[in-house]
Image: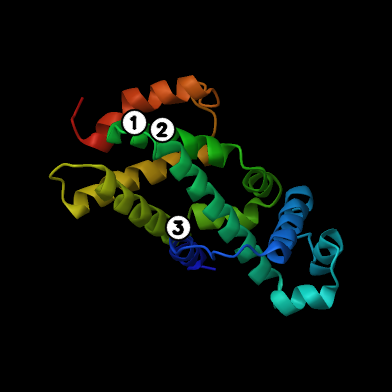
Amino acid sequence: MSDLTARLMLAAATPTPTEPDPALDAVADAALRQFELFGVTRSTMEQISRRAKIARVTLYRRFPGKDALVEAVMLRELRRFLAELDRVVKPLDDPEERLVDGFVFTLEAIRGHRLLQRLLESEPEAILPHLTTQGAPFVTAAREFLAARLAGDLEDDRTPAELVAVADVVVRLLLSYLLTPQAPVDLDDHETARAFALRYLRPILIGDGA
């Protein structure tokens, strides 16, 4: 699982199929709901096939095992997040506004994601290592992805290495607020979180030292 995040980031960056796949969506919906209610470890392919109202053999024909199904659900969730992130930030003309609003949207998305919060609460042993002591693949993939977006949004003379450093700070900050949500300010309030990002994150993102 060490390279799962990198594979997901790469797959999420590729165009999605033009033709919708209702059958795949139905299975992913059923699996996501099953994982939200009972966790990943306690969920079985048989339970998911029943929830999706398909035969177990049909499910195995599409996914050889639970790991493949978990990866498919995670990929769809990641693509949904990135599509919604683009919807939020692309209409903004100011690059600084896009960065600030993108940070706030991401913070709210990860702190409010039901499956992620379920895993952190009920199966921390399954997910925490991949976000902490074994988190290098996740941090690397996320910061490279963010650095590429920063390079497209910002018009300044910072080097690629400097943008990677900025992206690294942002990724680690988001991880910190995910794993330890208690903070001196109410980051669950949209306006408070945005004011926080404007005051403390904006200078890091745009490099103006303000």
Q: Where is mark 1, residue-wise? A: 97
Q: Is residue 69 above or below residue 113?
A: below
The image quarter containing residue 91 is top left
164 on left or right of 32: left
Amino acid type of the residue that numbered disc 3 sits on in the rendered structure: Phe
The image quarter containing residue 59 is bottom right
Q: Nearer the viewer, mark 2 or mark 3?
A: 2
Mark-to-mark CA distance, 3 and 1: 26 Å
Q: Is residue 65 above or below residue 25?
A: below
- Image quarter hosting the C terminus: top left
Q: Where is mark 2, residue-wise? A: 101
Q: Is residue 107 above or below residue 71?
A: above
71 on left or right of 85: right
Using the image as rendered, state which of residue 81 and residue 182 is in the foreground: 81
User: What's the residue at 47%, 41% (across, down)?
Assistant: 87
Mark-to-mark CA distance, 1 and 2: 6 Å
Amino acid type of the residue that numbered disc 2 sits on in the rendered structure: Asp
Using the image as rendered, state which of residue 2 and residue 10 is in the foreground: 10
